Image (cartoon, rainbow, N blue to C red):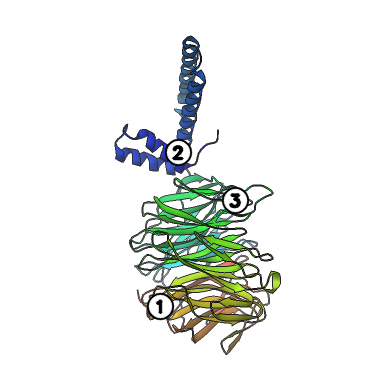
Amino acid sequence: MELERNNDISEKIAAYLQGRMDPAEAEAFKKAVKQDPLLEDQVAFAMLIKAGLEELATREAGKKAGKRRTKTILLLLGLILLGLGLYFFLKDKKIEEPEPNIGQRVTQPLTRPDHPVIEQGGGFSGSVSDRVNAISWNANGDVLLTGMVKGPAYFGNIKLPPIGETDLFLASYSIETGYNWVRGFGSKAGVSTAEDIAIDESGQIIITGAMFDQTTFDGRTFRTVGNSNLGKMDFFLAKFDPAGNLLWLDHGGGNVVPNLQTGDNRGRAVATTIQGDIIAVGDYIGAANFGSLKLPEGGPNEDTYLAKYASDGEVLWAKAITGNFMVSAYDVATNPEGDIFVIGYFGHHNIGGHVIFDEVQLESSGGRDIFVAKYDSEGKLLWARRAGASGTGPSGGYDYATHVAPDNQGGCLVTGWFQGEAQFGTFKLTSSGGRDIFLAKYSETGEVLWAVRAGGPLNDQGAAVVIDQQQNHYCTGFFRGKAFFGTNEIHSTGESDIFVAKYDRNGALLWLRQMGGDGEAFNSDSATGMAINPNGQIVLSGFFSGNMKIGNRILKSQGKEDFFLVFFDEQGNLLQFNQFEL
């Protein structure tokens, strides 16, 4: 008999304790089982014994009373001896959890000079990339960031020691003093990463990503229950207080069938509602559990989960988005009404395929296509739309949506990339040769209001979008070689450069900014995240290799790739410290 996962055990124990324990105590015990690996093992062992006793009782039911009484006595004696043995074995043993991995300052806190606010960070490994995958502002004017590093890594004057091969991190950054704190989480057995971050109305922090084998968060160890073709890997959702202390963590994953399936268990994106609830999306392979809910198994590759959590970590509902090939959600966003926008891609790049949203099925027009879907706050599908090119393989089989931002009219803005002739509602976009950037605006009812492209003959990608309070639209990503944004032509100074573009509410380009290498052909730079505060000021995250020029400053990577933060105003000017409004 296999050990059951935390949620299943806690539900069964809670049911057993009903009427035997005060409801508040039973609920506290249920949560403790869910989050404590040691207690999980103890309860699982008890469940095995309970199941064994029930099975023995069933077998003995038809036998003579004397034999049943004898075997029962022998069983009880055996259990007593086993209990005594466990007691004397464990009574002097101290279970030691690892200490929380908190970055330590190596110099005094920094005093910010009067120059553009640019921050660089990362490790010194020559072969590993350090990435900020997501950023967000909090109400105090600090920036929260998360991603992955190969340690030891440096965040300003804070050194973060390593746990495993590649760790995930959570950090708080202040314009006035640099990094407030940095925390690292990881597994000694492999790679862990955080993919997205969100901050709720009370300043609490939520991240999602992938954890490997036994992963340590804030001094507590959690063991995976899923297996992918990458090994023992789960998706996770974790909530922290404003100081970076872990409040709770939920994780899970399906199990790949060797030689029949390939895929991953990974949290992709997270958003919060004004009520404090949490919306999470990600990938799973096989079948996965969310509390007492079991999501169905789809195709031979990943499927997508969409789940809503209460503030305390309780799963309110969960549903699957499945297909006959790969289905992957890349981002999720919410609006003040509680509506949920999910974007991603589906299908095989050479064959195509379909994706299923409840009762709605979308068919690919050729290769891998884009989906945009809208749900209400209870998870009811409102609409789902397909976009993309009709070709397959290198000529048009790769269309991706990467990021979504809600507007104030019930619609949303989406970016990503496409190849070939792609249809977005009634708008047709044609790439210049390779993969081009797209920006598409959807109405409250799912109508495409406008769609624009940017790029050149090489591969270019849109990475993130935000909308300011005046409903102007900002997009960032990278381009290679020559690229056109409307009639504006720009050229990368390295292998790839970063762009930031501002559009009005109707899709007209207002300004365009570029930053990147200093002329070395091998320099590769890309944006990974963007966030805007109520004052219209923008923080941009990304990574670079070699040297990168931002304004008049040159950043030099210490490893293969380092990450950076840079701040702009709404006119695209690099922010000076004394211009920054907190």
Q: 423 and 140: which one is in front? A: 423
Q: 213 and 275: which one is in front? A: 275
At a point 48% along the width and 29% down the height, the residue shown is 51
Residue that label 1 marks? 468
| Quadrant housing the C terminus | bottom left
Q: For this view, does 334 lie left or right of residue 347?
A: left
Q: Residues within 10 Å of mark 3 (few under 14, many from 20)?
A: many
Is 437 rendered above or below residue 347?
below
Return the x and y of residue 357 as percentages of the image width and height. Answer: 51, 61
Residue that label 2 marks? 9
Give the residue furthest to the front.
Answer: 359
Q: CA distance from mark 3 to mark 2?
A: 27 Å
Q: For this view, does 334 lie left or right of residue 358?
A: left
Is 233 rendered above or below residue 75?
below
Residue that label 3 marks? 190
Kind of residue at disc 2: Ile
Q: Residues within 10 Å of mark 2 (few under 14, many from 20)?
A: many
- Determine whether the residue tagged by mark 3 lies in a helix, strand or loop: loop
Q: Residues within 10 Å of mark 1 (few under 14, many from 20)?
A: some
Q: For this view, does 316 lie left or right of residue 457?
A: left
Q: Are marks 2 and 1 in contact (CB under 8 Å)?
A: no
Residue 574 showing in the rendered view: yes
